[in-house]
Image: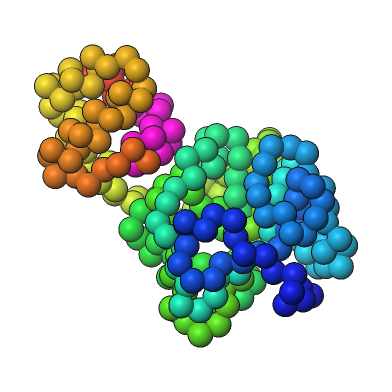
């Protein structure tokens, strides 16, 4: 399917240790070697033309599809903890992971909690949250990664999934979640933060106050949480 010489080292060299590579099935310049995610437009690559089954998989997604890549994490390699602040349902874009080859020795952590992605499953993950991957096994971890734009089909799918879930969705309690609850209960902290009109200064102050109260925050934590929970923040501030 993919020749050994076709795999390209991932361009984010600072984000991983070991060997992380990929090939593009859809890219902004139509070549299989272009792994960079850019604004529209996107084009099928010659590699996708060779992969009839992947074309069938993509037809199952009734939304605009942008980048499509196979990403391979070699044994003993790690993708360092990071977040993709604008990559989430609330921001109008989804990233789907379909494990093609994996093992129980691949450890994926989202907000410090391990999430097990089994071979052949289809996953949407809120990657605006902090995440990291460790391949502790002896085989490559290969995922089909599909980026798409949120439309009515995606919204209806998310709504149906939420309605049909057998119970409440698991809640990952992050240091920022804990700090936010402290702020909602502490009038002095509220006043300090509400007095800052500039978003960047607000983020810096939230990080400083969080660390002062024992929560190991950084700017990515705050930016990511603000994007995910702006409605919740607004409701709580109105009632503060």
- Left or right placement of residue 146 versus residue 216 in this view: right
Q: Residue furthest bottom?
A: 138
- The x, y position of residue 48, in whole percent, is 82, 61
Q: Residue at x 47, y 57 (%)?
A: 15
Q: Residue at x 75, y 70 (%)?
A: 6
Q: Quadrant of the N terminus?
A: bottom right
Image quadrant in which you'd find residue 21:
bottom right
Q: Quadrant of the C terminus?
A: top left
- The x, y position of residue 163, in whole percent, is 52, 46
Q: Residue at x 19, y 30 (%)?
A: 183
Is residue 119 something that shows in the picture?
Answer: no
Q: Nearer the viewer, residue 90 or 144?
A: 144
- Left or right placement of residue 221 versus residue 93 in this view: left
Q: Nearer the viewer, residue 133 or 235?
A: 133
- Left or right placement of residue 157 versus residue 51 in this view: left
Residue range corresponding to the magenta coloring: 221-233
- Is residue 238 covered in magenta? no
- The x, y position of residue 7, in whole percent, is 69, 69
Is residue 216 something that shows in the picture?
Answer: yes
- Magenta: main secondary structure equals helix
Asked if residue 129 is positioned above or below residue 155 in the image, the reply reads below
Asked if residue 54 is positioned above or below residue 217 in the image, the reply reads below
């Amino acid at each position: 399917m993919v020749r050994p010489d076709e795999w390209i080292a991932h361009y984010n060299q600072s984000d991983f240790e070991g060997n992380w590579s990929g090939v593009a099935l859809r890219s902004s310049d139509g070549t299989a070697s272009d792994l960079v995610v850019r604004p529209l437009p996107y084009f099928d690559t010659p590699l996708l033309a060779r992969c009839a089954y992947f074309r069938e998989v993509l037809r199952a997604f009734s939304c605009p599809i942008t980048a499509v890549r196979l990403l391979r994490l070699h044994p003993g390699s790690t993708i360092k903890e990071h977040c993709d602040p604008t990559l989430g349902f609330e921001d109008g874009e989804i990233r789907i992971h379909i494990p093609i080859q994996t093992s129980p020795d691949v450890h994926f952590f989202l907000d410090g909690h391990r999430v097990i992605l089994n071979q052949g499953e289809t996953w949407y993950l809120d990657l605006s949250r902090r995440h990291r991957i460790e391949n502790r096994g002896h085989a490559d971890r290969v995922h089909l990664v599909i980026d798409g734009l949120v439309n009515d089909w995606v919204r209806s799918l998310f709504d149906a999934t939420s309605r049909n879930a057998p119970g409440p969705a698991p809640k990952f309690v992050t240091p920022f979640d804990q700090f936010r609850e402290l702020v909602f209960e502490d009038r002095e902290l509220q006043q300090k933060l509400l007095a800052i009109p500039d978003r960047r200064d607000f983020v810096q102050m939230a990080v400083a106050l969080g660390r002062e109260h024992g929560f190991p925050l950084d700017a990515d934590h705050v930016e990511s949480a603000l994007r995910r929970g702006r409605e919740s923040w607004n409701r709580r501030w109105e009632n503060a």
